[in-house]
Amino acid sequence: MKIDNKKIEKILIIKLRGIGDVVLSTIIFDTIRKEFPNAEVDYLTERPSNQFLSNFDFINNILLLDRKSTLSRIKTAISIRNTKYDLVLDLFSNPTTAQITFTSGARYRAGFPYKGRKYAYNLFGPVERGKFHAAELHIEFLKSIGLQIHNKQLEYILDERDNYFAQNYLDSFSLDKSLLVGISPSGGWSSKRCPPKKFAEIADSIIEKFNAVVLLLWGPEDKSDVENIVKMMNNVAICAPDTTINQMASFINECDIFIANDSGPMHISAAVGTPTLSIHGPTSPLLQGPYGEKHEWVRLDELHCIECNLLDCPFNQECFNDLPIERILAKVELLLKKNKAE
């Protein structure tokens, strides 16, 4: 089946889960804008991803789904069917979104051909997910359904008020032209979270080697980790205040480089264009690392259980704890050199 672009008036994009997953989906936005310039585009997601999507003018409506609520799933499915979309792009393709797509009544229903879900779609993304970076997978999805790709960049629109909030806070510390290094201990799985003690060592080493200022950024699940990092450090770091996702993005945008686990803030950093170093344990940096050539990643490749993809570590997080600090500093140095011209 070939999509008749001229007949597409209403489009629904579906991507659930965390902020990082939704940020990675922005790689398709430019193509959607240019392939369907007159279409209304809605986006179905979960909290808190709606916060940053609200800054995109071309998204007409942001629909929120509570996956844990049967009533929410039913109401959402009915609302979507009543809207009469012409094209549904299910970038998530789990059982719930497959059902929603199938009952949407859309002429074109695109999704991944996962087992037990093919019934929902008449256009299919690639079968093998493990061949592509998570961002590139979205591009391959569009190619598979016959769309011409116009751009392959992540997008994140920063709000002027959030930028002012971040700049005003940092100005109070009289940083002058010091190298500002952002660090975030966030991570969706416990196994993806580098321990506070290691982050304290990283922060101290960066301050001492590069005469840098370290800015610790955190979300609701990270407060205790940041407090422990501060206690364990020998040097002084700046702690960001409590922020929204968009305010955090503005803080990251102010940084010269940003260091994080495989997490939402790491993908936000890549999207806003801050040179990013990701630290990986259970996940693949080739599939989930920061997207783009200006970034770097580091991991303990020689560890027997590296890239285990387990939610919880059955050992002692050797992938982080045994990662030599010299290896991390070498990557920081490389990151600074390759982005020096900017």
Image: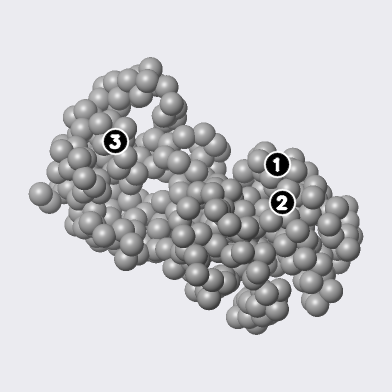
Image side of residue 223 versus residue 234, left or right: left
Image side of residue 3 versus residue 187, left or right: left
Q: Nearer the viewer, residue 55 or 64?
A: 64
The residue lying furthest to the front in this view is 315
267 w.r.t. 323: above or below: above
Residue 214: which quarter of the image? Answer: bottom right
Q: Contact (CB < 8 A) between labels 3 and 1?
A: no
Q: At 29% across and 35% down in the image, what residue appears? A: 95
Circle nearer the N terminus (3, 1): 3
Residue type at the position of mark 1 = Thr
Res 70 visible: yes
| Relative image position of residue 165 (x, y in whole percent) | 75, 46
Q: At 48% across and 53% down in the image, what residue appears? A: 310
| Relative image position of residue 315 (x, y in whole percent) | 58, 57
Q: Contact (CB < 8 A) between labels 2 and 1?
A: yes
Query: Which mark is in front, 2 or 1?
Result: 2
Q: Contact (CB < 8 A) between labels 2 and 3?
A: no
Query: Which mark is in front, 3 or 1?
Result: 3
The kind of secondary structure element at disc 1 is loop
The kind of secondary structure element at disc 3 is helix
The circle on residue 217 is: 2
The residues bearing labels 2 and 3 have C-alpha atoms spaced at a distance of 35 Å
Q: Nearer the viewer, residue 90 or 222?
A: 222
Residue type at the position of mark 3 = Pro
314 w.r.t. 49: above or below: below
The circle on residue 243 is: 1
Circle nearer the N terminus (2, 3): 3
Which residue in the structure is indicated by mark 3? 95
The residues bearing labels 3 and 1 have C-alpha atoms spaced at a distance of 33 Å
Q: Nearer the viewer, residue 174 or 117?
A: 117
